[in-house]
Image (cartoon, rainbow, N blue to C red):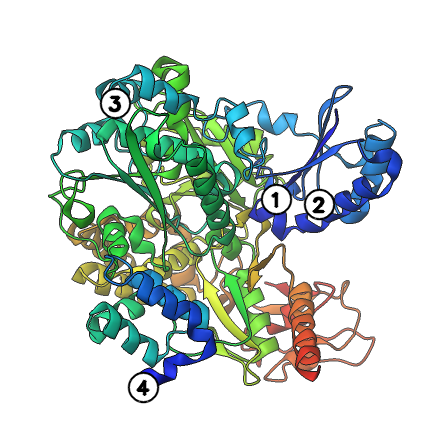
């Protein structure tokens, strides 16, 4: 199992693991690094962290499941985060959510079959005056309507298809 | 000398600010005659998010002129008229004066004015002067007295006097002491801290360094939400700049004072806004609160004395040191001094960030600064304090912004989210919304918070779909009071507030849902009937296949109809109609 983590994308994570070994309070940054490298926290990353840091796997698992950021399953290529903050809720985030579910054919926290999108609902993106808002990867889109939401998602899908074709 | 400033806070970026910036870059860079026509600068958020992308042009002839809702095309027109020919492009001009005259900017003094990535611009506006002053002229005790005299109270929500907190932390004994900045702004509907971090990170660092000097701390942590990537970027940059210039580090201003700041990214847990949970999270554990005492000022991070303050609190500190406590405490009311930043959002015309002197009434904030509701007419309620707060009805609009008086309404001052609600907002649905948030975020430690909020949520959900019972109302009240009195931390103690305040002020809406099976705001889909507006329908047929139960019929180019008996009220037809012809009755 430990061998598996020698994948090339594990580099940054492995480096960090040894760099911060023994430093207190580094478990969450470690898990964040793992997620950055793999897109999620794979079982062998938990094993590696436990081995290097000397923290029981059960405790690591407890921390992972406590925080919303961490995922135990791989993510799609693009992450759609719909804001469900108060301001967005008041101006119709529910409808936008329905459009996303409908367009991608997934419920919140699910990944599309083609692996292109993972759809999540988040508490607040802090762009309240541009409500309703969503984030696709690190780009925020505001003042959404059902039409613009559909258009955006289709655009991402087309680009993703074009990328895989080339 | 002409300057062009483009607002590139999160709101500006989301509205397409980068494209506007790039367009200006092209325009200013291309024409040879225009090379020195203007200097292009990035800036943070000035607070008028509703008019993003916001561009400011400063020159000697016209002073400062704002342009609102700028697109790359408008940018070209502004360039042509204002920058090339020195004529204000009146058609795109945005009147920023009306919104700002009633404001008093202390915490936001530099937001939208300086480039947050350039420490020199901060220094040019008296940046790090306050830190120099405390290190050369004041003892730690004098710093604490100054802050105490100013009357500054914690801006994170609870309103604990900052000077008192520092006094306790200074009095505690420990080999190390820590300063923590709580930048885990989790309240949905609040974005003051994000804006401050993105627009003026150095004022936070300076405030933290002054606090560290006051309590003799050597290390600071900024606990910031991972959902704020822009803020994290600016903070990292600011910390490295300040360290290079010797404003942070092992020998600050050559006075032998040592203070370093580390950044910790949160991992998404609302309860980490509570100080003992936040400490647990920095320590790498599950972010669960613990019993106090001992308070963090005695035994906090790794067991050492720790003072935790909010972003906005720190942003006020340098100003207080430079201008004196009386300049600050001359503003505000008896118990609440200075100013407060609010994030205006919801059904409001001019949403954004405003900073007003304490004591201003809610009506003044909403109508005079916020420009009233989006549809005109009065607001129905204003939600303050996020999931821990409550809904204040319009007839209490003359309530002043003051910790005690807001608390008396059943809401709380909170961190400063102010969500305005209009006639189409259902108050039962709002209560359900907040409770589903807190229920989801409850860490599960206290039984009443863990199970009680779940039961309350179930009741609200059934009321929203028309299955409410009359005895639900007293049951909600009873559960609410029990949860408040039997939870350990602020999350549980305040979770029932949105339900209790809506029950107090909008009981008729609950009754309408329960007895008449109607949602007066037409927001709860299960309690409305759908119909098609004969005047608007163009007979395009888009809605017909969208209906899963085949309740919509009609020929092409003729009026379509919905069979109410078949309709399952999913609302999907509304999302596909391009002419808004689906009505709710």
Is residue B223 positioned above or below A81 on the image? above
Is residue A156 positioned above or below B272 on the image? below
Chain ID of residue with mark 4: A
List the residue tagged with mark 1: B8
List the residue tagged with mark 4: A1
On the picture, is B206 further left or further right than B351? left
Residue A83 appears in view: yes
**Mark positioned earlier in the residue sequence (3 or 2):** 2
**Nearest to the observer: residue B256 or residue B502:** B256
Q: Residues within 10 Å of mark 1 (few under 14, many from 20)?
A: many
Report the residue at 11% width, 43% height from top. B294
Is residue B302 positioned above or below B442 on the image? above
Q: Residues within 10 Å of mark 3 (few under 14, many from 20)?
A: many
Q: Residues within 10 Å of mark 2 (few under 14, many from 20)?
A: many
On the picture, is B45 further left or further right than B73? left
Same chain? Circles 1 and 4: no
Residue B510, position as x, y percentages in the image? 39, 56
Give how far apart the Cα atoms at labels 2 and 1 are: 9 Å
Chain ID of residue with mark 3: B
For mark 3, give the secondary structure: helix
For mark 2, give the secondary structure: helix
For mark 1, give the secondary structure: loop
List the residue tagged with mark 3: B144
Report the residue at 64% width, 71% height from top. A153
Chain ID of residue with mark 1: B
**Dot 2 and dot 1 residues touching (CB under 8 Å):** yes
Q: Which mark is residue A59?
A: none
List the residue tagged with mark 2: B21
């Amino acid at each position: 199992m430990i061998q598996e983590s020698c994948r090339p994308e594990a580099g940054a994570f492995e480096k960090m693991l040894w760099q911060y070994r023994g430093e207190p309070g580094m478990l969450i940054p470690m898990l964040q690094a793992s997620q950055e490298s793999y897109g999620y926290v794979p079982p062998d990353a938990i094993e590696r962290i436990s081995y290097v840091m000397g923290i029981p796997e059960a405790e690591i698992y407890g921390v992972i499941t406590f925080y919303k950021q961490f995922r135990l399953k791989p993510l799609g290529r693009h992450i759609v985060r719909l804001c469900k903050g108060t301001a967005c809720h008041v101006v119709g985030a529910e409808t936008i959510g329905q459009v996303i579910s409908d367009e991608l054919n997934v419920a919140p926290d699910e990944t599309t079959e083609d692996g292109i999108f993972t759809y999540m609902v988040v508490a607040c993106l802090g762009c309240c005056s541009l409500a309703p808002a969503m984030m696709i990867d690190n780009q925020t889109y505001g003042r959404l309507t059902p039409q613009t939401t559909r258009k955006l998602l289709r655009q991402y899908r087309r680009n993703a298809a074009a990328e895989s074709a080339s | 000398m002409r300057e062009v400033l483009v607002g590139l806070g999160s709101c500006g970026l989301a509205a397409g600010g980068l494209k506007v910036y790039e367009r200006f870059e092209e325009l200013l860079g291309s024409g040879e005659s225009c090379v020195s026509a203007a200097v292009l600068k990035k800036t943070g958020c000035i607070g008028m998010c509703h008019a993003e992308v916001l561009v400011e042009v400063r020159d000697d002839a016209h002073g400062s002129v704002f342009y609102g809702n700028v697109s790359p095309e408008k940018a070209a027109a502004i360039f042509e008229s204002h920058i090339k020919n020195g004529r204000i492009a009146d058609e795109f001009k945005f009147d920023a004066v009306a919104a700002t005259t009633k404001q008093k900017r202390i915490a936001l003094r530099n937001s939208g004015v300086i480039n947050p990535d350039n420490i020199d611009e901060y220094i040019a506006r008296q940046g790090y002067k306050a830190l120099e002053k405390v290190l050369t002229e004041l003892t730690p005790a004098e710093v604490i007295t100054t802050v105490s005299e100013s009357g500054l109270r914690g801006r994170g929500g609870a309103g604990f006097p900052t000077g008192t907190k520092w006094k306790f932390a200074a009095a505690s004994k420990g080999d190390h002491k820590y300063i923590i900045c709580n930048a885990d702004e989790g309240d949905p509907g609040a974005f003051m801290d994000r804006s401050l971090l993105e627009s003026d990170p150095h004022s936070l660092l300076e405030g933290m360094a002054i606090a560290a000097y006051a309590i003799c701390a050597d290390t600071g942590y900024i606990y910031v939400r991972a959902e704020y990537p822009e803020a994290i970027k600016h903070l990292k940059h600011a910390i490295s700049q300040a360290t290079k210039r010797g404003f942070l580090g092992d020998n600050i201003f050559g006075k032998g004072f040592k203070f370093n700041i580390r950044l910790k990214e949160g991992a998404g847990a609302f309860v980490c806004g509570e100080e003992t949970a936040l400490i647990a999270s920095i320590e790498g554990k599950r972010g669960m609160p613990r019993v106090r005492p001992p308070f963090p000022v005695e035994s906090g991070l790794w067991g050492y004395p720790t003072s935790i303050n909010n972003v906005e609190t720190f942003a006020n500190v340098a100003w207080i040191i430079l201008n004196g406590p009386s300049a600050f405490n001359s503003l505000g009311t008896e118990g609440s001094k200075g100013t407060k930043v609010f994030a205006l959002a919801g059904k409001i015309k001019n949403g954004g960030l405003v900073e007003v002197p304490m004591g201003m009434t809610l009506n003044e904030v909403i109508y005079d600064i916020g420009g009233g509701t989006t549809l005109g007419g009065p607001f129905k309620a204003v939600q303050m304090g996020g999931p821990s707060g409550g809904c204040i009805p319009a007839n209490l609009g003359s309530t002043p912004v003051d910790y005690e008086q807001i608390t008396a309404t059943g809401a709380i001052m909170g961190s400063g989210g102010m969500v305005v609600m209009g006639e189409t907002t259902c108050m039962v649905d709002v209560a359900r919304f907040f409770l589903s948030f807190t229920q989801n975020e409850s860490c599960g430690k206290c039984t009443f918070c863990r199970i009680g909020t779940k039961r309350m949520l179930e009741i609200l959900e059934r009321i929203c779909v028309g299955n409410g019972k009359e005895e639900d109302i007293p049951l909600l009240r009873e559960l609410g009071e029990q949860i408040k009195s039997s939870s350990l931390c602020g999350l549980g103690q305040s979770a029932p507030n949105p339900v209790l305040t809506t029950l107090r002020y909008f009981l008729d809406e609950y009754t309408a849902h329960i007895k008449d099976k109607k949602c007066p705001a037409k927001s709860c889909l299960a309690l409305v009937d759908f119909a098609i507006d004969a005047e608007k329908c163009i007979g395009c047929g888009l809605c017909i296949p969208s209906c899963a139960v085949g309740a919509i019929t009609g020929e092409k180019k003729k009026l379509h109809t919905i069979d109410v008996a078949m309709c399952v009220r999913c609302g999907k037809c509304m999302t596909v109609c391009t002419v808004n012809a689906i009505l709710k009755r």
